[in-house]
Image: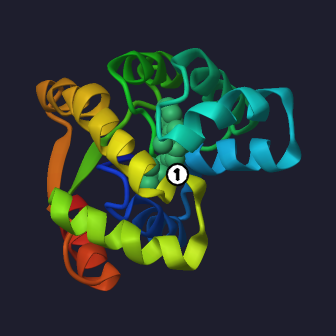
Amino acid sequence: MTLRIVLFGPPAAGKGTQAQRLVERFGLVHVSTGDILRRAIKEGTQLGLQAQRYMDQGKLVPDDIVMGLVKSVLRDNVQEQGFVFDGYPRTVTQAQNLDELLGRQRAIVAVLSLEVDREKLVARISERRVLEQRKDDSLEAVGVRLDAFHAQTLPLKQYYAAKGLLIEVDGTGSPEEVFSRIVSKIS
Ligand code: ADP
């Protein structure tokens, strides 16, 4: 099955976990802009330095930076057909850009929206704070991230619904439960 999927959802909805499972099951290329940006920061690249001040505060990194990164990932994978985009796109501008980059031949086939309410998200992030020590998991940054999701990312749902691509999935319960919901919706 050739899948090109966008995993959509608020911070801590479980996008990374489900993306990993989709990669294992369907052999997709995983494109996580969060991971790419964190790697750039670790490597201390110019771009990483630019991105870091936004990320630490919980703000979205500017579109042109993120779109440039995804463009080069797609250029490195011109032969690939299957992709899971995780944490990308996050703005309507990024979504339009992704459509252009993929073209008709490799268009997105489904957008899976992981539905988890705000209370649960905050609880999940508090747990993760202890384990992972991500700077943007601080209470303050989490508030900013959730607000950014509502203001800048949520409008994308309408964008994809209008294209008939949006599939809502209950994101609560164990990772296994969520994954089996996903598989049953896409197959
Ligand atoms: P989460 O979904 O839990 O917020 P991510 O790893 O996807 O985790 O994102 C972490 C941070 O990286 C975001 O808060 C933002 O600063 C930056 N980021 C990741 N992807 C994007 C994107 N597509 N556009 C803008 N900023 C992004």
Callout 1 secondary element: helix
Query: Which residue is at 60% across, 68% downward?
Result: 133
Q: Amino acid at mark 1?
A: Asp
* Residue 47 x %, y %: 77, 28
Q: Compare residues 178 and 101 and report the one nearer the observer.
A: 178
- Report if the beta carbon of the residue with label 1 is closer than 8 angstroms to ligand 1: yes
Query: Which residue is at 30% across, 26% downward?
Result: 152
**Dot 1 crowding, Cα within 10 Å, few <14, some 14–19, many 20+:** many
Compared to residue 145, the image places residue 26 above or below, namely below
Answer with left or right where residue 93 lies relative to residue 178.
Answer: right
Answer with left or right where residue 110 lies relative to residue 81.
Answer: left
Q: How many marks?
A: 1
* Residue highlighted by disc 1: 136
Answer with left or right where residue 62 lies relative to residue 39.
Answer: left
* Residue 36 x %, y %: 67, 45
Query: Which residue is at 27% across, 63% downward?
Result: 121
Q: Quadrant of the C terminus?
A: bottom left
Q: Quadrant of the N terminus?
A: bottom left
